[in-house]
Image: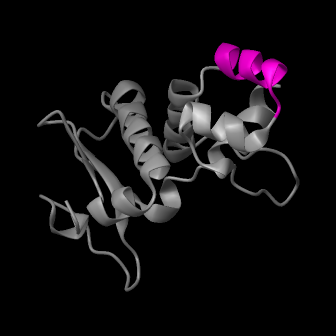
Amino acid sequence: MGDLAGAPGAPSLAPGQSFSGLLLPGLGEIWVNAAEAQEWPPRRRFTIGHELGHWCVHRDGPSDGAVYCREASVLEEAPATSAGRPARASEEEEANLFAAALLMPARLVEREYRRDREFGGLCGRFDVSGAAMGRRLRAVV
């Protein structure tokens, strides 16, 4: 869908904001921003993985409603912290970690990194963005 703001029950967004993806657990559906998916196919894969993370980790949480993820929520990069330490994992960060593990399993990333450390090649083999691969490499190697 092009503009997810028209999705069932979508909350209002500030001007200039958009949704990257959303999870409708009652329908068992994941929706992805079509324009973003067309422009950045690896980001589309990450957004789908992120929404699957919400399904697997958060669907039985306190809110059984839809999960709407603004573009800034579906980050392929680690969030910056003022003290240089990782922030406590929020539901969004947990969904990002799930997506990274799904798309770039640690064992496979380690094996491919040992075989060939060419960064662009790693991104291509896993079909992920440089931001996502950089974050995953920092986490597993």
Residue 66, how many percent across, how many down? Answer: 24, 47
Residue 15, how many percent across, how many down? Answer: 37, 86
Residue 87, how many percent across, how many down? Answer: 72, 47
- Lateral position of residue 125 relative to residue 82, left or right: left
Labels in figure, total: 0
Kindly give the residue lying farthest to the bottom in the view shown: 15
| Quarter of the figure with the C terminus | top right
| Quarter of the figure with the N terminus | bottom left
Picture quadrant of residue 48: top left
Question: Which residue is at 31% across, 31% downward?
Answer: 59
**Does the magenta-highlighted stretch encompass residue 105?**
no
Picture quadrant of residue 25: top left
- Lateral position of residue 49 relative to residue 137, left or right: left
- Lateral position of residue 107 relative to residue 103, left or right: right
Question: Which residue is at 36% across, 71% downward?
Answer: 18
Question: Which residue is at 57% across, 26% downward?
Answer: 101
Q: How is the image coloured?
A: one colour
Kindly give the residue lying farthest to the right in the view shown: 83
Give the vertical position of 54 relative to 110 (above or below).
Answer: below
Question: Which residue is at 87% across, 52% downward?
Answer: 84
Query: Which residues make up the magenta segment?
Result: 106-117
**Does the magenta-highlighted stretch encompass residue 108?**
yes
Main SS class of the magenta portion in the image:
helix
Give 101 or 122, whichever is nearer the viewer: 122
Give 116 or 70, whichever is nearer the viewer: 116
Residue 65, how many percent across, how many down? Answer: 22, 44
Give the vertical position of 48 relative to 111 (above or below).
Answer: below
